[in-house]
Image: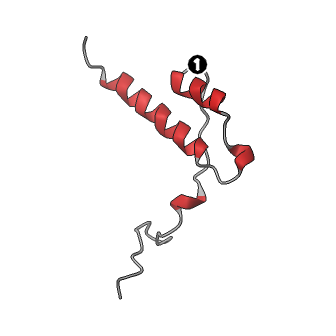
Amino acid sequence: MSYDSRAHLKMVNRMVKTAMWCLQDRADDRPSMGKVAKMLEGTVDITEPKRPVIFYLGTDEQNGTLNNSTQN
């Protein structure tokens, strides 16, 4: 069995997009578990999800770096 980096990258991309869909802020926007299984299997196309609000919390909006509230 040989390692195919393109296939591995496609699998990781599919997993990350699926996870991003599962993190959507509104419950109505999140996929059902059945759809999640199909997304991970690769039997349905996965559209680009919106970036969940949780990714904006604790970041400096201008440069995208993490804020550390304990620093002065």
Q: Is residue 51 left or right of residue 31?
A: left
Q: Residue furthest top?
A: 1
| Residue 45 x %, y % | 60, 26
Q: Nearer the viewer, residue 59 or 63?
A: 59
* Image: 14 above or below 4: below
Q: Is residue 38 left or right of residue 29?
A: left
Q: Residue furthest left?
A: 2
Q: Nearer the viewer, residue 71 or 65?
A: 71
Q: Amino acid at mark 1?
A: Thr
Residue drawn at (59%, 54%) of the image: 52
Q: Residues within 10 Å of mark 1 (few under 14, many from 20)?
A: few
| Residue 18 x %, y % | 55, 37
Total count of labels:
1
Q: Nearer the viewer, residue 9 or 33?
A: 33
Quadrant assignment for the C terminus = bottom left
Residue drawn at (59%, 43%) of the image: 22
Which color scheme is applied?
secondary structure
Residue drawn at (67%, 42%) of the image: 30
Q: Based on the displayed image, in which of its 4 quarters is residue 6 positioned?
A: top left
| Residue 21 x %, y % | 60, 42
Q: Tag 1's secondary structure?
A: loop
Quadrant assignment for the N terminus = top left
Residue, disc 1: 43
Q: Based on the displayed image, in which of its 4 quarters is residue 46 positioned?
A: top right
Residue drawn at (30%, 20%) of the image: 4
Q: Is residue 8 left or right of residue 39?
A: left
Q: Is residue 3 left or right of residue 31?
A: left
Q: Residue furthest bottom?
A: 72
| Residue 26 x %, y % | 71, 52
* Image: 70 above or below 4: below
